[in-house]
Amino acid sequence: MEFNLSQLGLLFFVVFCAVAGIQVLYYLILFRRLAVYKAASVDTNNNKPISVIICARDEADNLVKNMPGVLVQEYPLKHEIILVNDNSTDHTKYVVEEFQKAFDTLQHLELKQEAKMIIGKKFPLSMGIKTAKYDTLLLTDADCVPASENWVKHFQNAYLPGIEIVLGYGAFHKKPGLLNKLIRFETFHSALQYLSYALAGIPYMGVGRNLSYKRDLFMKNKGFSSINMIPSGDDDLFINKVATLRNTAIVIHPEAHTLTRPKNTFNEWMRQKYRHYTTTKYYQPKHKFWLGLYSVSFGMLFPFCIASALFFNWWIALSVLGFRWLIQGIIFYKSMKKLNELDLFPFFILFDLWMFIYYVITFPSLWKKPKQSWD
């Protein structure tokens, strides 16, 4: 019996070292790319006109708060802001009309009929794209506000030759409380992945709160036609389909972020995340493999660490975990600094433990049917 326990403990430790090693490799080979990223110098003389598109349904209050930040952008060339009002029943129409009196760049596209057989906001977004005058599109949501008046400029500057997609960071407002920090850390953790993957030449998603691509790219790929029956995915699934090694860039300057008010309760946040994760099953196989390997190795890390500590050697097990935390901490610090989330760094080990619980909670969403909702 003693021999068997010894063998079992060694097995636990070997598996623990393997999954910890996989995690370290992800941080050193993949996530390090965001930590050391430096934007290329740009020639601002190459800037071109741009169309900003915002879809809204019953978002009058958010538009009052956030539209001024979009309308006062300092961009020297022609640009337009298209507000797609999708069958709103509140006073969205009148809010937009008031803004139009002061800003001639604002276009109001009012939809008064629901699209049949097209779920979510893909139809209003498609209508906004088809209405756009300019080839470069910049997308955000009605509940978002640009972090600066140079938001448009930073995105346009990222369009070097051959680039058709620019991925941005959609941050959340910093507020007191634990829930705010949990939401912001999960958002940072997701951004660390999709931005690093893009830098590695395997882009797999973007976030509709802060995303840009070429109108011609949208048209050539027949828009959202292949994903119209999926409620979500107007951002991540479209990018998963059309992004390539050579046509995708990122912009992470703090002035290029957008800011959103986070959910007020844990249950609201979880419902939102469940809805988002239901689209993951539609990713390309190579993306599902690499994302799945990271998630599975992370999910196995702490259980096998505990098993190794109990049945093998506790201080060796903790040493391996400590080395992984050291590498992770270095990458987190540099990446959080770039994404203006550095206040989260002192708690990164606690957040790392929380993410294990978070993965367990959200794991069932990978098999759930997407909710038939607009956003």
Image (spheres, rainbow, N blue to C red):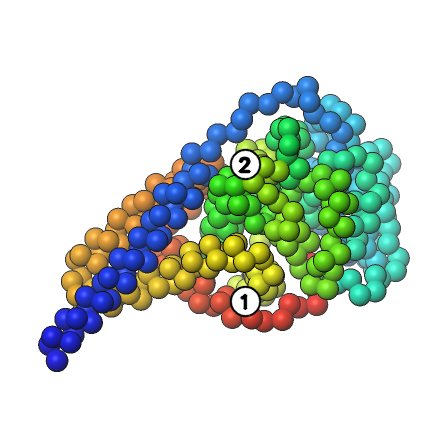
Residue under label 1: 366
**Label 1: element kind:** helix
Q: Nearest the camera: 314 or 367?
A: 367
Residue at the (65%, 47%) spot, across then down: 242
Left or right: where 249 falls relative to 63: left
Name the residue at the right extreme. 112
Which kind of residue does numbered mark 1 sit on? Answer: Leu
Question: Mark 1 to mark 2: distance in Å?
Answer: 29 Å
**Residue 112 seen from this side:** yes
When asked about the image quadrant of residue 67, the answer is top right
Q: Nearest the camera: 155 or 202?
A: 202
Residue under label 2: 252
Residue at the (82%, 45%) spot, across then down: 130
Q: Position of residue 209 (x, y in %)?
A: 64, 47
Q: Nearest the camera: 252 or 283?
A: 283
Q: Nearest the camera: 47 or 144?
A: 47
**Residue 183 seen from this side:** no
Is residue 321 placed above or below 304 in the rendered structure? above
Q: Quadrant of the N terminus?
A: bottom left
Is residue 201 placed above or below 110 in the rendered structure? above
Left or right: where 350 falls relative to 41: left
When asked about the image quadrant of residue 30, the answer is top left
Is residue 33 placed above or below 123 in the rendered structure? above
Crowd tier of the residue under label 1, counting other residues whose Cα lies within 10 Å: few below 14, some 14–19, many 20 or above:
some
When asked about the image quadrant of residue 102, the answer is top right
Q: Position of residue 281 (x, y in %)?
A: 57, 63
**Label 2: element kind:** loop
Q: Position of residue 264 (x, y in %)?
A: 57, 59
Name the residue at the bottom extreme. 1
Left or right: where 318 falls relative to 90: left
Count the marks. 2
Which is in the foreground here, disc 1 or disc 2? 1
